[in-house]
Amino acid sequence: MSADTLHFVVGEEKKVRELLLDADVLPLLKGALAAGASCARVTGDDGEELWGACSPAGRGGLLRSLPLMLEGEPVAHLELFGAPEMRERLEPLASLLIVALDTVLRNSLKRVLTTEIHTSVVNSSHEELVAMNAELARSEARYRELAENLELRVKERTAELRRAQAHLLQQEKMAAVGQLAAGVAHEINNPLGFITSNLHTLQKYVARFCAMLQFYREHLELEQPRERLVTEAETKWRELKLPHVMADVGDLMAQSLAGAERVSRIVADLKGFSHVDESGESVVDLNQELERTLTLLSHQLAGRAEIVKELQPLPEVKCQGQLPGQIFLNLIQNALTHAGASPRITLSSCFDGERIRISIADNGPGIPAALRGQIFDPFFTTLPVGSGTGMGLAVVWEAVLKLQGTVAVADAPGGGADFIITIPAGRN
Amino acid sequence: MIEFDEKERRMVLKLVYYGPALSGKTTNLLQLHDLLTRQGRGELMVLDTSGDRTIYFDLLPFFLTAPSGLKIKVKVYTVPGQVCHDATRKAVLQRADGVVFVADSNRAEAGSNVASFDNLERNLSLVGLDIDSIPLVIQFNKRDLPAAVPEEEIRTTWDPTGIPVVLASALNGHGVAETFALVAGLVYDRIDARFALAAKHGLTRERFVAKLTSLKEEP
Ligand SMILES: Nc1nc2c(ncn2[C@@H]2O[C@H](COP(=O)(O)OP(=O)(O)OP(=O)(O)O)[C@@H](O)[C@H]2O)c(=O)[nH]1
Ligand SMILES: [Mg+2]
């Protein structure tokens, strides 16, 4: 306990002078005078007078002396003086007075003790409060420090998460591109397959042509009769099945050329889609990007999905070239995944003079309103765990954001989800 | 000790009845007041109560004079047992010379007994007193209850501590004077060692204890 606060120990001794007031005692003593005593007084245990009331006529003799007890200890005496003939009357009065004084004294002690203990408890409670307050201030400082650290840690964690998320977005882009690559590989493999097979056939055909030419060269040197040469050559010609070969060779060449052209067209599309040759921004036509994406997906779409195109001319947009492809690829793949057995995908575009609006709608189950706030969040997926990273739409969101546009989902007419992308297109 | 005044030849001792709420501390003092002779005993002072629950304390003072003339006042206090009055308990416990711990024999109160004893230990150390050296008596009160913990169990728990145990039924006056006599004797031993009550003041242990605990003659 601090030194400057009130300090008191329960049980410290009280003096009778502290407990009795003049106003308590003097009226009683004066009452004794009125009743016939010549003098009434209270003396301390050393004999000294504490209170007294005497008539001017003189004290007279001591008639009665009674002890006044405080906590079992005689601490004072009540003394009554008077003429001897008054003794009989004054003795009962003395007993009465001592009872009165005793009662006053006891009540007073009780009051003082109650006040003291109350003050002490209040004081100590106050001190406890002060101490508690100091403790709280200390712990508050501790908490503030903790909170600051926490903020720092949250920042670190957030940065970590952001890094992880960016990494996943990158992975998702790669996954989409991977799927695309698989489709494209198939597209390229097909013509490449028959070009190779055609070349093998042509190789055999060329060998036969060579054999025929060799025959002529050898027989011309022999200077045989012309008729014989013609007959033998005709025989060889048929032996080498050259009529059939001659008929086939044209088709083979034409087929192979067409295949090679197809491959080079796919490569061009791929290059265009990936904008691999461009650095920084380029000017693109979103309809063309949409078509390119469809072309690249043709192997996945062919015979499986119905594509409806309602494309209106659009102004060109300046942007990072690969962004539109990312958007369309992910949205069309998303539609294919969710649209069920016979997907129909409706692609439409229009321009209202300020904004380009592109919609990619499917005939799937659609997206419940309750989920619409979440679908663009990273990791959100309606597919069973493990079958999707849930990042496809996040990639779309990110790419649209880079185009300074917005993406939202609505109900397609007749059910299904309708992803609507709005991109500002200035007239400049 | 609240006071020792060599010149005034006065000594004020303090005994405190401690224990859980409703264990019978106030009842002990009421019974002491009724059992003991009026000689040298003050009136029982019961400070404000709320119902019959002690809020501040009860006080039963005793006064005696040694043959040497040394005046000795012994003030016996109860503390409020309710947990919420801890500040009061601490205040009353300050500078105590001896403690009676009134435990409730009711088995259901075993937990309260332990908590209150822990509280006593802590508060003693908070006011600078040592539970190992302060005269201490444990009273197991309410022996009359049918659900009272058996004596054997109490002995097994407390005898190893060396703290004397008294079994009591304060409501019926049993064990009340014994408890008081026991703690008075222990307090005497402690004071005598320091102030030579017997040698210097002619006050023997027997006389001290007898003066405090002389029973009323049966009328
Ligand atoms: N059966 C039984 N009841 C008792 C005994 N002693 C006290 N009581 C009862 O227990 C109740 C509480 O007694 P108190 O003396 O007021 O208890 P306290 O320890 O002073 O309680 P607080 O002032 O709240 O700390 C009263 O109803 C008493 O009659 C006993 O020996 N036996
Ligand atoms: Mg009580």
Image (cartoon, coloured by chain):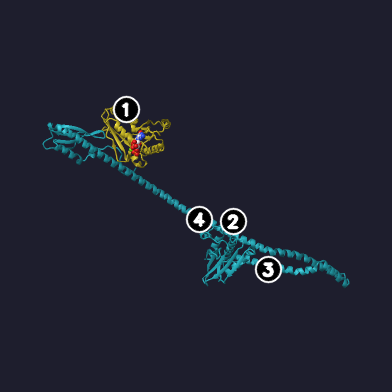
Residue under the image location 21 percent in, 37 percent down: A100
Q: Is residue B197 visible?
A: no
Query: Which chain is home to disc 2?
Result: A
Q: Colour of chain B?
A: yellow
User: Which quarter of the rendering shows the C terminus of chain B?
Assistant: top left
Ranked by sequence position, the earlier of labels 4 and 2 is 4
Residue under label 2, please give it: A387
Residue under the image location 69 percent in, 67 percent down: A260
Query: Which chain is home to disc 1?
Result: B
Mark pair 4, 3: CA separation: 50 Å
Query: Quadrant location of ligand 1?
Result: top left
Q: Nearer the viewer, mark 4 or mark 2?
A: 2
Front residue of this view, candidates B191 and A368: A368
Residue B175, located in which quarter of the rendered image? top left
Residue under label 1, please give it: B205
Compared with A306, B2 (above or below) is above
SS for dot 4: helix
Disc 1 marks a residue whose amino acid type is Arg
Q: Position of residue A36 (x, y in %)?
A: 13, 36
Residue B103, located in which quarter of the rendered image? top left
Query: Which chain is home to disc 3?
Result: A
SS for dot 2: loop
Disc 4 marks a residue whose amino acid type is Thr
